[in-house]
Image (spheres, helix red, strand yellow):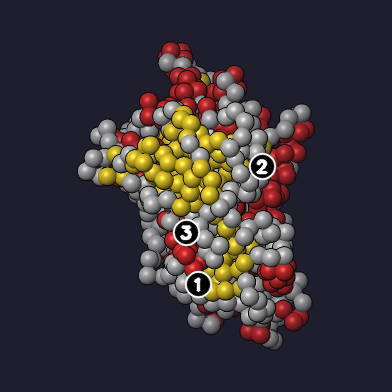
Amino acid sequence: MHRGVYFDAWFPRQHCYHPSLPPRRLRMVDDLVDYRATVLVWASMGGGSLALPYLEQEAFGPVDARSRFYGFVNDSEFIAACHERGIKVLGIVFEAQGWEFPVELSEDEDEVLALNELRGAGKRDWMGLREFSSNRYPKLWRPVEHYFPDGLVNSDGEPVTDLIEECVVRDIDQQPCHAHWVECPDREHQCFYMDRNNPVWREYLKAVIRIQIDAGVDGIQLDEAELPMGAFQYGACFCKDCMKGFRAYLQGLKPSQVDIALDGVDLATFHYGEWLLERGYDFRSGRETTPLFGDYYAFQCRAIKTYFAELAGYAREYARSAGREIVVSGNFFNLEPMYLALADDVDLIITEMRNTTYRQPEWYRYVAAFAGDKDVVVVENPYGGVVPELIGLLAEGKGHDLFRLSLFEAAALGANMSVPYGSWMGSVIEDSFYAPHGLASEIQAFLADHEHLFARRTVNEVAVVFSVAATRELIGRADASDNTTNRRDESVVVPYRAVTSALAGAAVPFDVVIWADGVTAPDRATAGELERYSTVVLPDVHLLTEAQAAAVEGYLAGGGTVVTTDRVAGGLPRHERLRSAGRTSVDDLLPHGRQVETPVPVAANLQRLADGSVALHLVNYDYDAAADAVRTLTDVPLRVRLPEARRHATVVSSDGKRTALEVTREDGAHLVVLDRLGVYSIVVFHDGEL
Ligand SMILES: [Zn+2]
């Protein structure tokens, strides 16, 4: 499993400015070695969103003697230094960002005197994608033709001289949209929200990828992978290429699939934006109930899959042409279902959480399901969660157990939570997130030294189905706020969330099975993926595809037990092992009883290790704010049902201590008592040596 570092390395007590990351120093590599880092995410060369010559400067630019004195290096040199220590570096492609910065220049425009942070020197102007694409600064930057010898031509066959005007996302009134979440409100800089559906922008992003690969990256991370769907929050996108694409999508539908609202409409000239405006819709309010929204959503899902795959394929192919294999990843924000179809195109799953809290075991089980057999690296989010508060505590020398919990929780539940290294604090807070060095080193050393006690495969008896179709509307309502607040409307009950939270809160180890709807992503439901579970819970799964209904039937026929909550899909067979339960009635959700029984407030996960042993991961959330520590629980009884009997049990606690436990067996269950349970322990049930 990867141990990721969220390596923006932004400065303390200063804005986290996109798209450019601060110069790297050799000393940072030593820190990363202490963190036992295997991969750096959001790590290198973001400057392509400003201009390609600027990106080249990040990658290969000269470093003066004074900077060398403190070990400053350019990014290609930094990557080489990481390679010497076995650390992989991903180049970050900010796909949705198109930047314009205030700049101060010498009289001859042959020197940048200030950029972004001005100081009242020289001539004031602008510097960014517009100036790059119009060859505005010939003494500073190579011409655009150097990078695109055939020039840039748009889908109307016109030459492009202003990348922003050409590629920006537009709302229904054709106004350009901004990527507000990265613009610092007290700065003049502007970040436009760009659109990958525009072929010109894809050509530009490919040039960014080429430069990053030339600089030696181990992989390409495509951030904001859902563009332009992230601009729905701004009432977009109605740019010419989205309108062309949607028109083609509608024309490709079978007549029976075309919405009745389009009766008598000439699809050859159809313009969705104009059509909506004529009917009084603005795509800002009540978007989900706007006419043709379902079709438009399906079109955009197909578009993001197509164009993400195009860039992923291009990156691999370009690297191969240079004799190298790279990994491709993205940012699948909160692992929302729209990214499911994109997961096939990546080697490593990376996700930014929507709401970082002190306790989210059920979310991590979803993450593990989404990732399947791929590694997954999670990063925290400064908005709508506990991160600013946690940073405040850490700055006062407090909150160490809370930080430990955040990393151990992920590991226990099948994911990797990255270590922050100057990571993002949003565009308002003037600070970046560094963990106390000793604390981060201690946690990471435990995880690295006990790698053999972690596995993706589980022996959990219960699976909970996450149905994309059945949850979409409720989750859409609960999580409707924009991405600078990430507020969650707790008054909207999402039964899937209620069930998984109840189970996780009762120390029930479970897996999640994600069922896509065939539109957002391919529907791959089979009875085979369910058969190893004794119980499958269907929370509010009121819609089933044919394949999903067949999976339920096949699973029941094979002897499985199905528990439904809330709404039930029509067409399910009557069956003695198909029953219903209240969404938070844990015992009713578990007709076969609890696999793990313990009276303490822990989350549990049963991982099947490579040698056949089983590791019970226990996360203790009993944080006492007054003492600023997780209470150490004593004499903790555990009763654990395993697929097969194991002779020995050994507990490994997160301080590195290991203790053999006495095991008694009773009705197929293993009974042990832990003398002490701190923040995190792993109880291994094994036959041979551990
Ligand atoms: Zn568009």
Real-space CA distance between mark 2 and mark 3, rounded to the nearest whole angstrom: 31 Å
Q: Residue at x 33, y 35 (%)?
A: 400
The residue carrying mark 1 is 581
* Dot in front, 1 or 2: 1
Q: Are marks 2 and 3 in contact (CB under 8 Å)?
A: no
Instruction: Tell me the crowding category of disc 2: few under 14, some 14 to 19, or many 20 or more residues within 10 angstroms, Cα based.
Output: some
For the residue marked with disc 1, what is the amino acid?
A: Ala
Relative side of 551 to 94, left or right? right
Measured along the vertical axis of the image, is residue 603 above or below residue 657? Answer: below
Whether residue 588 is visible to the viewer of this picture, yes or no, is yes
Whether residue 511 is visible to the viewer of this picture, yes or no, is no
For the residue marked with disc 2, what is the amino acid?
A: Asp
In the rendered structure, find residue 347 and report the number of the disc placed on it: 2
Q: Residue at x 57, y 69 (%)?
A: 563
Percent position of residue 156, x then y: 70, 59
Residue 522 lies in quadrant: bottom right
